[in-house]
Amino acid sequence: MPDILVVGGGLGGVAAALSACRAGQSVVLTEETDWIGGQLTAQAVPPDEHPWIEAYGSTATYRELRGSVRDYYRQWYPVTGSARTWRQLNPGAGYVSKLCHEPRVSLAVMQAMLAPFVASGRLTILLEHRPAEVFVEGDRVLGVSLLDTRSGDSRTVTAAYVLDATETGELLPLSKTEYVTGAESFDEYGEPHAPAVAQPMNMQGITYCFALSHHEGENHVIDRPDDYGFWRSYQPDFWPGPLLGFSAPDPRTLEPESRWFSPNPAGDPRGVLADQSAHAGDKDLWMFRRILARGLFDPGFTDSDITLVNWPLNDYWLRPIIDVDPAPAHREARQLSLSLLYWLQTEAPRPDGGTGFPGLKLRHDVVGTADGLAKSAYVRESRRIRAVTTVTEHHVTQKSHFPDSVGIGAYRIDLHPSTGGDNYIDIASVPFEIPLGALLPVRMRNLLPAGKNLGTTHISNGCFRLHPVEWNVGEVAGHLASFCLRRGVEPHEVRESFLEEFTAELDQLGVERRWPSPAGY
């Protein structure tokens, strides 16, 4: 029996397992796919981060992850001399992040970070396992039945603490933990952008990402997808034209904006400004999430960049995936992404006046799948616990201080079109704190959220859902469970009676809990 069971091997789950193992606990970590890492790997989403990430605004272990990604490229890839000495090496030189990189690299780094604990027997990783049943007694989880999706066998794991790091908060309904989905009403918290009436099935769309390279003169056109006719003609009510087209709303203004697609542009990748506070960069589709820039590597290494397709054109919002049968939505979302690729290869307007880019190659190898789509959908919104503290739009649009802060984050409130028919809600926010109370369910005593399922709202989730914050939440959940085991107390008691001791430990471990406010001396 492990001390801690972490269900879900995404960024929050990896961070939770790492922090618990480093604290001396025995851990079982499960993951539904065959890759740990969630957003960065199985979902193939390069890191979305705030503009100060290179200097401050993350935990020490998240900074360790980022540094190790750069070290991996310097050690194993034939980077040019100038790229090797580039302190803030950005392997993809994409606009979305200062660290655009391939999913397999972050996978290798996270596997290496966990490897000592696997070797020592302190950590057991169960890949391709998903939760099937949760055993509960009163306000405590006793164990979780896990289904091995390869063999069909089941096993039950019991633990003193169970952390839900699944992408959709799967343990919450299984354990009958109180939770929320979709959009809260305006009356509940007075959020300016909340609807008048609660909309529990109104959630952000999902996306099946994929990677492309381009090889002029070659033909890599895929078979016409079954649903291509539907997606080729589909035009949302709030869209300026067909979804499969280069005109889409600007997320911030909602005005129609033209995007463009020009594979393998010339120029020095080191000159790319990856700072969304100064330059959103989302209009240049090839450059926005480029994850490998050929100009940073020795001649002959590769004849094409690699770009990651996670665009407005393949956001899927026709059906929700939570508290319903998710299979139809996943099938349709996959068909949308394949239809987008087919449209790009055959019909998309080219800068030279022609149509179609038949040289676009779907990079199955980059995402590790037979069909070339990411192993998992990019899920932006989870079930969320009813928490002791709920972070609302107010807390992230005006400076708020939480006495029980256990982390920090920053990102615009970035809600993509939703299953309720909403257009983008993309508004400015301020750097925020993560309160310990948001990790505490109102009733359950030994079940903790370790990802996007903490106590936020539909609105505030829009800036809590990104990579550094998910990692921070998971890491603190691991620390919290470890602290409770060591001190013989429960999580709610930590907040009530042991907060100073617990936060002092977090400070020592490099968990930033306050945004810096430098003053003269």
Image (cartoon, helix red, strand yellow):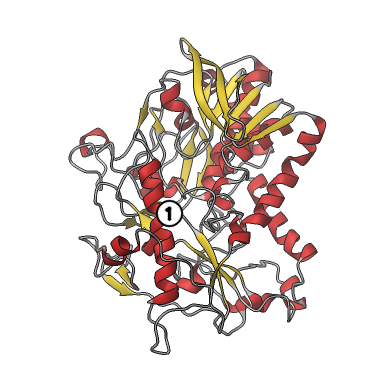
Q: Position of residue 106 (x, y in %)?
A: 66, 53
Q: Residues within 10 Å of mark 1 (few under 14, many from 20)?
A: many
Q: Position of residue 397 (x, y in %)?
A: 36, 49
Give the residue at x 49% y 21%. 133
In the displayed orientation, state which residue is furthest to the bottom: 352
Rendered position, 11 above or below 488: below
Q: Does residue 504 appear anywhere in the picture?
A: no
Q: Does residue 5 appear anywhere in the picture?
A: yes
Which of 367 and 196 lies nearest the eye of the viewer?
Answer: 367
Q: Horizontal placement of 82 versus 448: left or right? A: right
Of the 4 image quadrants, the one containing the N terminus is top right
- Number of numbered discs on residues: 1
Give the residue at x 28% y 65%. 253
Rendered position, 403 above or below 394: above
Q: Position of residue 267 (x, y in %)?
A: 59, 84
Residue 281 falls in which quadrant of the image? bottom left
Of the 4 image quadrants, the one containing the C terminus is bottom right
Rendered position, 219 above or below 144: below
Q: Which residue is mark 1?
A: 334
Q: Horizontal placement of 16 versus 358: left or right? A: right
Q: Horizontal placement of 331 versus 492: left or right? A: left
Q: Horizontal placement of 439 versus 33: left or right? A: left
Which of 209 and 287 lies nearest the eye of the viewer?
Answer: 209
Q: Amino acid at mark 1?
A: Arg
Which of 73 and 470 lies nearest the eye of the viewer?
Answer: 73
In the displayed orientation, state which residue is furthest to the left: 196
In the displayed orientation, state which residue is furthest to the right: 120
Residue 248 falls in which quadrant of the image? bottom left
Q: Position of residue 192 (x, y in %)?
A: 24, 46
Give the residue at x 64% y 14%. 488
